[in-house]
Image: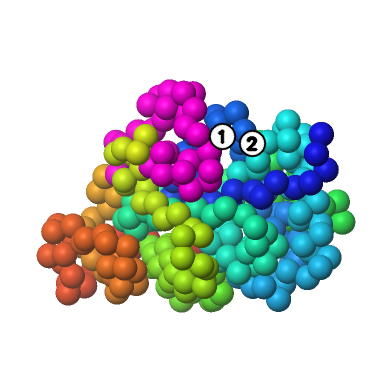
Amino acid sequence: MSNELKPPIIIFGNTRSGTTIVQKVMATHPDIAGWYEPRTLWLYADPGRRHDEFDESDATDRVKQYIRKQFLKFQKQHGNCVVMEKSPANILKIPYVRAIFPEATYLFIVRNPFSFISSVELKWQRTLTSKGIRRRLESTPVTQLHHYAGRFIMQHVNKRVLRRKYQSLWGPRYKGIEQDLKTHDLLTVIARQWSVCSRKAEKDLALFEHGRVLRLRYEDFVEDPISDMERICAHCGLEMATRMVTAANEWVKSDRQDKWRRFEPRDLARILPEISDEMERHGYEIPPEIAQFRTTKPSVTNIITAPAR
């Protein structure tokens, strides 16, 4: 078995934006091994940092060596297949990831912010499962476990003991999110989790050579997954496999794009200043039922309050 690390395939994309389904279908390819969110591995450079923004200066030789070694280990454990990795928090770490893996093949996926906000608001209400905790611990260096034990405990205390509706923090931690949680309602913070991450990603992706990053939209993928899978395979230098087509037809669903309608259009209109510029950049239009309330103040009773800290 080869002792050389094959250039991995890295998926960049915000949480709840389709990175999981893309990886899941791609990982049915016989030459690919999907690595699902080894988040704490990427935090190796500074596990105590209170946000997820890392840049190339954080990718020291020690950090590069450790993370690349873990990728090689995963590769060997999975039949020496190419590792396809995705960790949503890496949308705030693009220069850092690129400095560690300059040879990698990169994908980037984006999703409509209203669908994102709806899905993420539900995630803020849930605690990490025991399965999720085990998966996190598997990719965490033993010497850094103490950085995460307190977070897991507090999460369960907030939900199980104090019976709070929302976690104290969930999803990508942009710089300033903790202060925003003190001064803004949760819907605004979630909107910023989409827009701040999108804005930073665009700035970082602009530094890649032309053609290095394949861009995808979640909405296009779920409507015509086979077409996008062909694009991904061509970008990654792979041949489409029959099992990928079968998996895409079985797993990819296009009926999850309107769940944002559970919110009042008036309340979604309130956060348009947070997301409208990035929506335009990605070609998303504001639904008419939201646009009609664009200048209308929201009902105070409908504002989703930020979680207690």
Q: Which residues are magenta?
A: 228-257
Disc 1, SS: loop
Three-letter residue code for mark 2: Ala
Q: Residues within 10 Å of mark 1 (few under 14, many from 20)?
A: many
Instruction: Please identify the quadrant where the N terminus is shown.
Output: top right
Q: Which mark is residue 243?
A: none
Mark toward the start of the polypeptide (2 vs 1):
1
In the picture, measured across the screen, residue 159 lies left or right of residue 223, that is: right
Task: Name the kind of residue labelled 1 in the image.
Answer: Ala
Residue 192, image x, y percentages: 42, 68
* Residue 209 percent across, percent down from the top left: 51, 67
Say which element carries label 2.
strand
Count neighbours of disc 2 (C-alpha within 10 A) and say few if under 14, some if 14 to 19, many if 20 or more. Answer: many
Quarter of the image with the C terminus is bottom right
Front one among 228 and 298: 228
In the rendered image of this protein, does residue 284 appear above or below residue 275? above
Q: Which residue is mark 1?
A: 27
Residue at 18% in and 70% down: 294
Would you say residue 38 is visible in this rendering?
yes
Which residue is more in the foreground, 289 or 34? Answer: 34
Q: Are marks 2 and 1 in contact (CB under 8 Å)?
A: yes
Query: Would you name the residue on which mark 2 appears?
Result: 33
* x 60%, y 28%: residue: 30
Relative to 97, say whether 10 is above or below. above
